Amino acid sequence: MAKKKLASGATKKTAKPRASKKRASRLKGKDTKERIAELARSVVAMAEREQDPAIQIPVRSLSNIAYNEKSRHLEMGDNEQSRSFFNFGQAKRFMQTLLVASKCNDLIDIGKTASIRQIYYLSKHTIKGTKEKTFDDQSESDPIIEDLEVAVDSLREQLHVFASNRGNLAGPITLVDDGNTLDCAAMGSAGYAVPSIVEADVIQFKKCKAKFILHVEKDTVWRRFHEDRFWQEHNCIVSHGGGQPARGMRRLLRRMHEELKLPVFVLLDNDPWGYYIYSVIKHGSINLAYESRRMAVPEAKFIGVSSFDYDRCDMNDDVKIELDANDIKRAKQIANYPWFKNKRPWQKEIKKMISNGFKMEVEAMISKNLSYLTEEYVPMALKNKKLWLD
C-alpha cells in the first residue's frame, strides 16, 4: 500500500497511531553510539548515491499518539517526517540535527555529560563564509535534542545530556549514586536531590526497607511530610517533583516501582493541573510519549486531594479558589482523555470539581491544623482503598 504524504514531509503508514515495532526491532541491542553512527552512515550512503540526504524522525504530536490499554501508557505511532538537506524549508533543521548528534557522540567518546544549555553553546557558531548562525537561541536546539532521542530511540540521558535537577526524596532507602553510598534517611532537611540521570549505571539500589512511595506535588508540601517524619512513621519514601516531575524523578519512580516492587501513591492539588500531573506520572506525557514505557507508572494511585474532601473533611470557605473559564475548559479536556473517559470514578471526580465551582490546593488541609495533612488526612486516605482513584 502506498504511503500517504502528510504536511512537512511526514509519511503516514497507518490510519491509527501505534507503537513502531519495526523501528524498535531494528534498534534492539544497539548502544546509543552505534545508533548515532548508523544515522550518520545512512546520510552518507544517500549522498554517495547522489540522493537527497534525509533523516526520518517520528512525529511528536497528539495525532501520532495512542493509548495502549494493555500496557496502560501512551505510545508513539508510526508516522514519520522526512527532514532532508535539499528541501529549503528543512535544510537548517537537517543540519542542526546532525550537528547535535555529533556533539552527543563526542560526549559519549570522552565519557562526559552536558546540560541542554551547554549543548546549545557547544553547537552554536557562525558558519564559515556566511553570517548564518547554527542556532539563534536555545529554543531552536532543545527540540532538536528531543528529535534526536526519537530518531535513535535513546533516552536523552543515554545521549549524555542532562537537565537541571528537580525533586527530592527521603526515606529508608540506601542508594549508590555515582559510586557514593547515600542513606536517604540521613540526608538532612533537604533530603536526597534527585539528579537528571538516574539510570542503573549511575544509581543503584543497595538497601530498601520502605513499603511504598508517597509522591507529592510541591517542595513546600514535601517539607511538611519530611519535618513531621512521615516517612519514618509509615516506613515509606516521600518524594516531590516541584510541580510536574522532571524526567529524572519520573524515571526514578518507575525504577523504584519496577525493581523494588514499591506501590506509588500520588498526592496532588485538587485542580486540572493536579489531575494532569497524575496522568503524566501514570500514563506518560504526550510530548514524551516515546519514553512512556521507561517512565510511566501505570499502577500509581491518586489518593487526593479530592473534590469531595471539602465536605468529607469539613473544610471552611477560606480554602476555596474559584475556577475560571480556563480551569473548566482544561478539566473537560482531561475528562475526555481516553484513559479517563471510561472511568466512572474519575468522571465523577471531575464533574464534582466543576459543580463545586472551586479548586483546592493540598495545603488547604493545613487550615485544619499544621499536621492534619500528615497525621490524619493521608493516613486516612491510604487506609481507605475506596477513596483511591486509578
Image: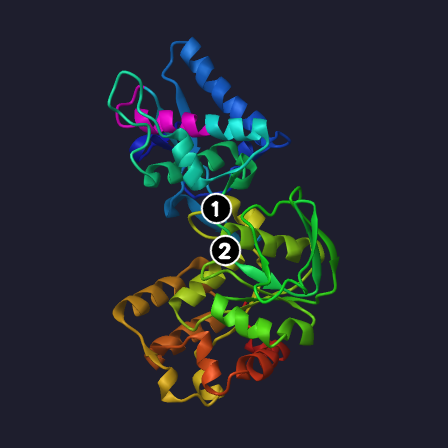
Q: Is residue 332 left or right of residue 172?
A: left
Q: Residue at x 69, y 49 (%)?
A: 180
Residue 103, given in percent of the width and then of the height, sits at: 47, 28
What is the three-letter code of the residue carrying label 1? Ala
**Residue 75 painted magenta:** no
What residue is pinned by disc 1? 163
Q: Dot 1 surroundings within 10 Å: few (below 14), some, or many (20 or more)?
A: some
Q: Residue at x 33, y 28 (%)?
A: 134
The one of 27 and 371 positioned closer to us in this rendering = 371
What residue is pinned by disc 2? 166
- Is residue 369 visible in the rendered structure shown here? yes
Q: Residue at x 48, y 70 (%)?
A: 220
Kindly report the distance in space between the C-alpha atoms of the residues bearing marks 1 and 2.
9 Å
What is the three-letter code of the residue carrying label 2? Arg
Residue 206, given in percent of the width and then of the height, sits at: 74, 53
**What's the mark number on residue 330?**
none
* Boundaries of the magenta span: 86-101
